[in-house]
């Protein structure tokens, strides 16, 4: 299996196709199969791209090593994109992100746009503790204090227990929560629930819980840094993704070369809810920046 071994982690990636490289990342408790299990990896590869699906630290098959700091912070996770690219000999690449992985993707793009052919974000934002309040125009010049806002451990504990079919059933009975709130309205509802269950089952629950306690620490959307992003950027969000609608509107205002797409009738898990539709949006964007 393809791994990159570092001093504190083994990073897993899966390499498919040939052509311009696209490095992908995913959301919390997920793994690279968010893209491959839904068929998007295969569709992008068939369109002439080399797709490198990665598992974030503490997710899927990317596991910590030893007793050192596992690196569950936005800078380290962002730097992993460059580490994998360097390992594969890639000078520049497209970066395709989702949710939590997108938070790291925005951080990377703000610091290293020169390495990106493009940034493609699905259902994400630039703060690691996203809020509608700080996505409002009134706060675009707000000066954040250099301190972290800790995530309540109860949220991480809840995710740690999110491993069984019983838990999936409970989430369904309560309307799907903020992340799966449109699954039951989907024409392929059974497939959506089956795929999310299969994807989530891969990540070790304790590593995910530790990751959550360390990663979600800052409500600052890093507006000055976002204004430095100098590569073509695609911002995709589901119409009913209640957590990331406002953060996407903010990013559409402040990133210089950003294209903002709201996908009708979808929620947070756009790759699961509409794989062909999302792929079409990605390929339209990729085609437009290479013409």
Image: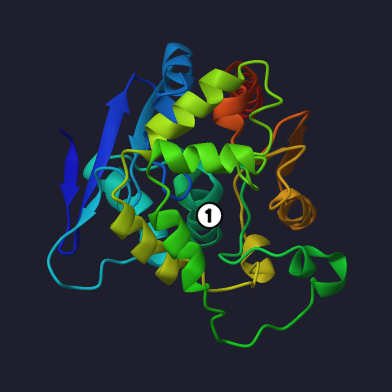
Position of the C terminus by quadrant: top right
- The answer to whether any part of residue 142 appears in the image is yes
**Which residue position holds label 1?**
109
On screen, residue 188 above or below 22: above
Measured from the top left, where is residue 27 in percent x and y?
Answer: 48, 46
Q: Residue furthest top?
A: 46
In the foreground, 192 or 25? 192
Measured from the top left, where is residue 19 in percent x and y?
Answer: 39, 21
Measured from the top left, where is residue 158 in percent x and y?
Answer: 47, 59
The answer to whether residue 178 is left or right of residue 91 is right
The answer to whether residue 49 is left or right of residue 137 is left
- The answer to whether any part of residue 120 appears in the image is no
In the foreground, 127 or 259? 127
Crowding at dot 1, Cα within 10 Å, few <14 / some 14-19 / many 20+, comes out as: many
On screen, residue 132 above or below 31: below
In the foreground, 46 or 289? 46
Identify the residue at horizontal 38%, vertical 61% (top origin): 209
In the foreground, 254 or 33? 33
Q: Secondary structure at mark 1?
A: helix
On screen, residue 178 above or below 50: below
Which of the 4 image quarters holds residue 263? top right
Identify the residue at horizontal 61%, vertical 64% (top origin): 127
Measured from the top left, where is residue 214 in percent x and y?
Answer: 41, 70
Identify the residue at horizontal 65%, vertical 44% (top origin): 174
Position of the N terminus by quadrant: top left
Q: Residue furthest right?
A: 138
């Amino acid at each position: 299996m393809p791994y990159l071994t570092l001093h504190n982690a083994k990073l897993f990636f899966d390499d498919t196709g040939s052509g311009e490289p696209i490095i992908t990342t995913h959301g919390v408790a997920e793994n690279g199969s968010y893209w491959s299990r839904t068929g998007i990896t295969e569709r992008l590869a068939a369109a002439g791209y080399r797709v490198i699906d990665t598992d974030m630290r503490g997710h899927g098959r990317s596991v910590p090593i030893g007793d050192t700091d596992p690196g569950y912070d936005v800078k380290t996770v962002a730097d992993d994109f460059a580490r994998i690219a360097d390992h594969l000999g890639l000078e520049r690449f497209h970066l395709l992100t989702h949710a939590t992985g997108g938070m790291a993707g925005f951080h990377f793009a703000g610091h290293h746009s020169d390495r990106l052919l493009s940034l493609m974000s699905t259902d994400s934002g630039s703060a690691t503790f996203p809020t509608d309040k700080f996505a409002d125009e009134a706060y675009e010049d707000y000066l954040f204090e250099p301190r972290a806002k800790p995530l309540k451990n109860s949220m991480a504990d809840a995710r740690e227990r999110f491993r069984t079919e019983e838990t999936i059933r409970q989430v369904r009975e309560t309307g799907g929560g903020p992340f799966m709130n449109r699954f039951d309205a989907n024409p392929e509802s059974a497939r959506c629930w089956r795929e999310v269950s299969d994807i989530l089952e891969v990540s070790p629950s304790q590593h995910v819980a530790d990751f959550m306690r360390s990663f979600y620490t800052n409500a600052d959307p890093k507006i000055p840094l976002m204004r430095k992003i100098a590569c073509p950027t695609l911002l995709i969000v589901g119409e009913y993704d209640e957590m990331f609608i406002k953060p996407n509107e903010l990013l559409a205002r402040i990133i210089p070369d950003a294209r903002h797409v709201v996908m009708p009738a979808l929620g947070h898990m756009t790759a699961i809810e509409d794989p062909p539709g999302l792929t079409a949006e990605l390929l339209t964007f990729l085609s437009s920046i290479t013409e």
